[in-house]
Image (cartoon, rainbow, N blue to C red):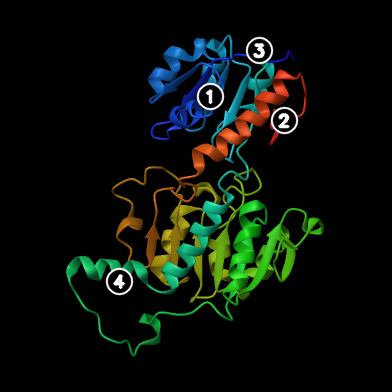
Amino acid sequence: MSALGATPTIGFAHVAYRFGERFAARNTGMPFIEIRSREELAARIGEIDVLVVSGFWDNALAATAGRLSFIQSISAGVDQYDQNILWACGIRLASAAGGNANAVSEHAIGLILAISRRIGEARDNQARKFWRGMQGDFAMREDELGGKTLAVVGLGRIGGRVARLAKAFGMHVVGLKRAPSTGAEGADEVHAIAKLHEVLPRADHVALCCPLTPETQGLIGAAEFALMKPTAYLVNVARGKVVREAELIAALNAGRIKGAALDCVEEEPLPPLSPLWAMPNVIITPHTGGETCAYEDNILDFLMENLGRLQRGEEALLNQVV
């Protein structure tokens, strides 16, 4: 594949992020287009040499993207890109792995704290101007994290930091990863994903931090909920399809687990008729785990590094996928 020219046209395609503003502040001299809708991206894809995108991407765009040579994904996950199509069209792809590791890991810990300390209930009571009294019922009382066991499924950049942060709260952390020999990343124990069913009965909290792959799709379902403690919580900052949502709802309704904190769901936005909205033992955040005031600059750091490599004719990219 040929080297990238000195002044490629960059396309920033996102509904809200302010990439253009932050890119202009770097004074690169490179022209750029800021795109705010799928329709606008489809109309202007032929003008773009380098595309910074995530949710707006449609694999059909590759056929009309005559100038496009590189996609810098805004997201760490790249399941929306058909890698065979990109390769056939000569389009390189790099992920944003690590760009939101701090934000997502902190969000996961925030969800664990929120569901343990019943922060969602307190916020609901605030809206009602209701001052709840002290609780005699242990099942209704706030809990603490010290001494509890956290299972972290996926021990990469995000999961590894979740493990290290959880240790600061005195939790016992059991990590599960595809290749446990590559390191514990701060966990007290590390096991292969294949050991999931052995670990689940021990866990007070299960945090999903893994990428969506054929191996992890539907990883958590009825069989897994049946193994969990009835006092355990599920936290998902991975992808919605890692969990079989109908089976999660059934487990929550039956009291097979105590609650769930979800930053991602199978269908996003979550449909208004989903029973998850009204469940008192569920906290939902709208896939905002990765959002941070530093996000644009984090992604632009990846972009600039990869632009430099492409302009020098280097083959290897930072976070290379294709």
Quadrant assignment for the N terminus: top right
Residue appearing at x 73%, y 53% in the figure: 178
Question: Disc 1 marks which amino acid?
Answer: Asn
Q: Residue furthest bottom?
A: 136
Question: Disc 4 marks which amino acid?
Answer: Ala
The nearer-to-camera label among 2 and 1 is: 1
Q: For residue 317, which numbered disc appears in the image?
A: 2
Question: Disc 2 marks which amino acid?
Answer: Leu
Q: Residue furthest right?
A: 181
- The residue singled out by tag 4 in the image is 122
Quadrant assignment for the C terminus: top right
The nearer-to-camera label among 1 and 4 is: 1
Whichever of callouts 1 and 4 sits on the residue coming sooner in the sequence is 1
Rounded to the nearest whole Å, what is the CA distance between mark 1 and mark 4? 47 Å
Question: Dot 2: what SS?
Answer: loop
Q: Position of residue 295 (x, y in %)?
A: 50, 42
Whichever of callouts 2 and 1 sits on the residue coming sooner in the sequence is 1
| Disc 1 residue crowd, few under 14, some 14–19, many 20+, Cα 10 Å | few
The nearer-to-camera label among 4 and 3 is: 3
Rounded to the nearest whole Å, what is the CA distance between mark 2 and mark 1? 23 Å
Placement of 208 over or under 226, stated as above or below: above
| Disc 3 residue crowd, few under 14, some 14–19, many 20+, Cα 10 Å | few
Label 3–label 1 contact, CB within 8 A: no
Rounded to the nearest whole Å, what is the CA distance between mark 2 and mark 3? 16 Å
Whichever of callouts 2 and 3 sits on the residue coming sooner in the sequence is 3
- The residue singled out by tag 3 in the image is 5
Label 2–label 3 contact, CB within 8 A: no
| Disc 4 residue crowd, few under 14, some 14–19, many 20+, Cα 10 Å | some
Q: For residue 27, which numbered disc appears in the image?
A: 1
Question: Dot 1: what SS?
Answer: loop
Label 1–label 4 contact, CB within 8 A: no
